């Protein structure tokens, strides 16, 4: 098979060499992994027995003891986690919405924008659990500490996302309000808010989904909800009960996820025509890939 | 040898894309298929290699039945049929060579191609395919860095790397400008002549069909309304295929411009 | 003064009323909020009383000697890194094939698609620290259980992100690979993987960041890392030490984020 005569180039280029790059990458990963494993006091016997140990515990959870758990009010505890998440999200929504207007490049002046953004970043850096650890000392044990911790922490993520939503608006309506001689507040209310509210509402709902999981975890350190029940059962090695608690939690979480995702889809479908593939990190965790 | 026997294709929504098509294409022929969009041109090509399953009739490629074939048989048939797409269908983020090597998928053990450990012989075939379309100098360039015409030539090289007996081209120049369109059509005709690969090309533009085709097939509403030598084609034939008179939008180049280009 | 029918004049439309459903939904949401607030013991006064709480004095001054002493914070911080690295490599490694199975575009068949989706949904529905606590109970306290838990967590996050990226990828090269007679696995790796691989690396870096943050709290349930220090110090109400730790961790997290963001920008 010989090449025909052409007015186009026929000399083969030399194959680029990636060997060094590849070797360096493999080496980097190998060293990182090797170094990390040494720190995790992993012995061969431990490594070998871990899967069977884990499987042993998981198999002890079946059949789950639903009867005893429902008697102990597991459903109420799961619902308490949901209430905590709901109130926490509401607090965060109420606090973050006005702050977001103060942080957006296109509507806020520099002197207020920069500190507000830094506030969001600082809040986001502290996990709910740490916030709760501190708040427990202030409010005492109970769901209110959990709701407050979730509320404060979520201000960071919701504020950042809402800011980004505001920054991506169409400037036209805002300009129109200004052209009629409207104040800054009227511009926000009539020029910006109608454009961003659907997106921001869907962020709130998404954050609620995440917060349901977070509030379940907060219970583990005494901030109300189902987490405390799980810890108690695990400490007493009551694995039938653990199985029941886990299943009830998973069912409730999946139901909330499904309903909330459906509502979000409807809210967004009413505004932007195509958001296929938009389920990115923002959607999953309420944070953004590119800050 | 390609034989269509009473082939029908009905899509799930109930749209009938092909109705009782009978067609025979001999080895080494260069066939151009024309028709309005929606006439079934693309379906005709795609049911030939099983990308669209025919819902009735029989399609034989070199004696092998395609309709209702098992996936193993279908892969075997496909490996002998190169396909060129309107939108090139290249992987933009990888090198031209890797794109062309995709033509070797049916010949290379799955584990090797999955891990990207292509045998040297297959790499050689890919290089030769690139030489044949004249862009071997771009072998290690990312596909996204090429122009449209170059990308389509990579598409042709990928089909050539299969060392096929049949080449299907689905509107190969619809996304290209007039000059590169002619280059690509020229490549296809040259490959047909040099290597004797049976070639079926879907075209929208009538003048290109006249210029490059030998045999012309006209499709209208899923039925073959014309099948004959391109020399016998006149404006009335096109009127029958298109159901209306020829408009300038059916031509790649308007007459006056055509002269200056030559 | 109805003037309908006169040329050029049009009857004014009736102002549309909000539909009953709107009021129903609005009052249901409001009602639920009030009920939930009552259930969690919502107290407005907390918002101002919190600032005057004597507890805040316990945060200051930060005992830097203690914080910077090698064994106290930095040792566990290194352990945190090790947990995060192992978990990221294991979780993201496993996520690669599972994500392809979970994407509509590249799944080998329906059974695999629905099965993997269902399993991963359940895994994701269990909160991360529940996994940690379960594994600590099952295989013992320490970083070993922590890295297991974070591996599961990384896997869950990664498959969700990456399978959706695959869903949205260009499917035309895949058609070309199939037309060339390729089997399923090579068709996917040659036709789709190159397109989505940069996103995969970007997500892996992102998951690493998440893991660093998450391993901060793993210690609260006995799964190793710096969280362990938070847990012991909070029992003694040494919030000054916790604050010092948080500041160090904050600096480290920010530094990692900067590096990771810089790498991701080059990738995408």
Image (cartoon, rainbow, N blue to C red):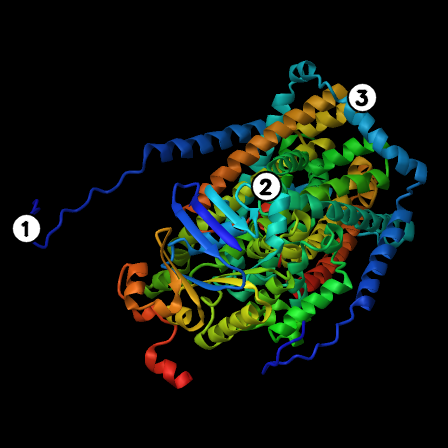
Residue B185 rendering spot, x and y as whole percentages: 49, 71
Residue occupying image coordinates x 60% and y 41%: B70
Q: Quadrant of the N terminus of chain C?
A: top left
Q: CA distance from mark 2 to mark 1?
A: 63 Å
Q: CA distance from mark 1 to mark 3?
A: 85 Å
Residue A116 to residue C118: above or below: below
Residue assigned mark 3 = A236
Residue B121 rendering spot, x and y as whole percentages: 75, 64
Q: CA distance from mark 2 to mark 3?
A: 37 Å
Residue C61 rendering spot, x and y as whole percentages: 79, 52
Residue B84 to residue C133: above or below: below
Residue assigned mark 2 = C47
Query: Could you tell me which secondary element the residue under label 2 belongs to?
Result: helix
Query: Could you tell me which secondary element the residue under label 3 belongs to?
Result: loop
In the displayed structure, does residue B67 sit left or right of residue A220? Answer: left
Could you classify mark 2 by the number of other residues whose Cα lies within 10 Å: few (under 14), some (14-19), or many (20 or more)?
A: few
Q: Quadrant of the C terminus of chain C?
A: bottom right
Q: Nearer the viewer, residue C91 or B182?
A: B182
Residue A194 to residue C268: above or below: above
Is there a contact, CB below 8 Å, between mark 2 and mark 1?
A: no
Q: Chain of mark 3?
A: A
Q: Nearer the viewer, residue A64 or B235?
A: B235
Residue C6: which numbered mark, if any?
1
- Whether discs 2 and 3 lie on one chain: the answer is no
- Whether discs 2 and 1 lie on one chain: the answer is yes
Q: Is residue B143 at all visible to an observer of this figure?
A: yes
Could you classify mark 3 by the number of other residues whose Cα lies within 10 Å: few (under 14), some (14-19), or many (20 or more)?
A: few
Could you classify mark 1 by the number of other residues whose Cα lies within 10 Å: few (under 14), some (14-19), or many (20 or more)?
A: few
In the displayed structure, does residue A173 sit left or right of residue C225? Answer: left
Q: Which of the two discs, 1 and 3, sits closer to the camera?
A: 1
Q: How many marks?
A: 3
């Amino acid at each position: 098979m010989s090449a025909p005569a052409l007015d186009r180039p026929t000399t083969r280029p030399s194959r680029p060499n990636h060997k060094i790059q590849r070797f360096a990458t493999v080496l980097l990963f190998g060293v990182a992994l090797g170094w990390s494993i040494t720190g995790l006091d992993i012995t061969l016997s431990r490594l070998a027995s871990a899967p069977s140990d884990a499987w042993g515990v998981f198999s002890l959870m079946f059949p789950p003891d639903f009867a005893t758990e429902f008697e102990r009010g597991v459903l109420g505890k799961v619902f308490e986690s949901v209430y905590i998440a709901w109130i926490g999200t509401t607090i965060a929504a109420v606090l973050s919405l006005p702050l977001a207007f103060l942080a957006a490049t296109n509507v806020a002046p520099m002197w207020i924008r920069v500190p507000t953004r830094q506030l969001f970043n600082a809040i986001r850096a502290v996990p709910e659990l740490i916030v709760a650890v501190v708040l427990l000392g202030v409010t005492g044990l109970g769901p209110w500490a959990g709701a407050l911790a979730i509320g404060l922490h979520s201000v960071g993520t919701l504020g950042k996302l809402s800011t980004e939503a505001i920054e991506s608006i169409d400037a036209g309506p805002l300009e129109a309000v200004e052209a009629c001689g409207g104040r800054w507040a009227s511009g926000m209310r009539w020029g910006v808010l109608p454009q961003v509210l659907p997106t921001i509402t869907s962020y709130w709902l998404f954050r609620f989904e995440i917060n349901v999981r977070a509030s379940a975890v907060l219970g583990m350190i005494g901030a109300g909800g189902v987490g405390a029940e799980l810890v108690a059962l695990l400490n007493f090695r009551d694995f039938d009960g653990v199985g029941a608690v886990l299943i009830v939690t998973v069912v409730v979480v999946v139901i909330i996820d499904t309903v909330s995702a459906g509502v979000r889809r409807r809210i967004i479908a009413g505004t932007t025509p195509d958001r296929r593939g938009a389920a990115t990190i923002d959607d999953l965790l309420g944070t953004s890939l590119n800050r | 040898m390609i034989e269509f026997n009473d082939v029908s294709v009905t899509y799930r929504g109930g749209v009938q894309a092909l109705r009782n098509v009978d067609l025979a294409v001999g080895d080494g022929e260069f066939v151009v298929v024309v028709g309005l969009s929606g006439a079934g041109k693309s379906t005709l090509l795609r049911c030939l290699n099983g990308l669209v399953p025919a819902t009735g009739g029989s399609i034989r490629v070199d004696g092998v039945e395609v309709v209702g074939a098992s996936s193993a048989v279908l892969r075997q048939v496909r490996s002998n049929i190169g396909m060129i797409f309107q939108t090139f269908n290249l992987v933009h983020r990888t090198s031209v060579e890797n794109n062309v090597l995709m033509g070797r998928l049916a010949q290379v053990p799955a584990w090797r191609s999955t891990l990207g450990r292509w045998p040297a012989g297959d790499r050689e075939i890919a290089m030769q395919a690139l030489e044949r379309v004249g862009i071997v100098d771009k072998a290690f360039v990312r596909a996204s860095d090429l122009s449209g015409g170059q990308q389509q030539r990579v598409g042709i090289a990928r089909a050539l790397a299969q060392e096929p007996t049949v080449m299907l081209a689905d509107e190969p120049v619809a996304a290209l400008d007039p000059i590169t369109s002619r280059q690509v059509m020229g490549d296809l005709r040259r490959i047909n002549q040099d290597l004797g690969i049976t070639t079926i090309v879907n075209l929208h533009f009538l003048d290109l069909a006249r210029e490059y085709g030998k045999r012309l097939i006209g499709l209208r509403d899923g039925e073959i309304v014309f099948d004959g030598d391109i020399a016998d084609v006149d404006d009335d034939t096109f009127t029958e295929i298109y159901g209306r008179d020829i408009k300038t939008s059916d031509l790649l180049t308007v007459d006056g411009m055509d002269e200056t280009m030559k | 003064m109805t003037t309908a029918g006169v040329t050029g004049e049009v009857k004014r439309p009736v102002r549309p009323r909000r539909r009953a459903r709107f009021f129903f939904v609005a009052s249901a949401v409001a009602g639920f909020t009030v009920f939930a607030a009552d259930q969690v013991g919502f107290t407005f006064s907390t918002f101002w009383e919190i600032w005057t709480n004597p507890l805040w004095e316990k945060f200051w001054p930060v005992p830097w000697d203690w914080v910077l002493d090698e064994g106290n914070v930095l040792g566990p911080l290194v352990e945190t890194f090790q947990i995060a690295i192992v978990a990221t490599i294991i979780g993201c490694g496993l996520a690669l094939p599972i994500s392809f199975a979970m994407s509509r575009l590249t799944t080998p068949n329906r059974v695999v698609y629905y099965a993997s989706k269902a399993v991963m949904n359940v895994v994701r529905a269990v909160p991360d620290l529940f996994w940690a606590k379960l594994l600590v109970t099952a295989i013992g306290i320490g970083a070993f259980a922590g890295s297991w838990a974070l591996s599961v967590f990384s896997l869950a996050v990664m498959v969700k992100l990456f399978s959706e990226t695959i869903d949205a990828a260009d499917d035309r090269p895949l058609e070309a690979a199939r037309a060339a007679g390729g089997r399923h696995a090579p068709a996917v790796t040659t036709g789709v993987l190159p397109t989505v691989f940069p996103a995969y690396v970007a997500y892996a870096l992102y998951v690493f960041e998440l893991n660093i943050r998450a391993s901060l709290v793993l210690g609260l349930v006995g799964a190793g890392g710096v969280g362990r220090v938070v847990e012991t110090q909070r029992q003694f109400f040494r919030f000054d030490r916790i604050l010092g730790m948080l500041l160090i961790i904050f600096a480290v997290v920010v530094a990692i984020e900067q590096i990771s963001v810089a790498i991701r920008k080059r990738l995408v």
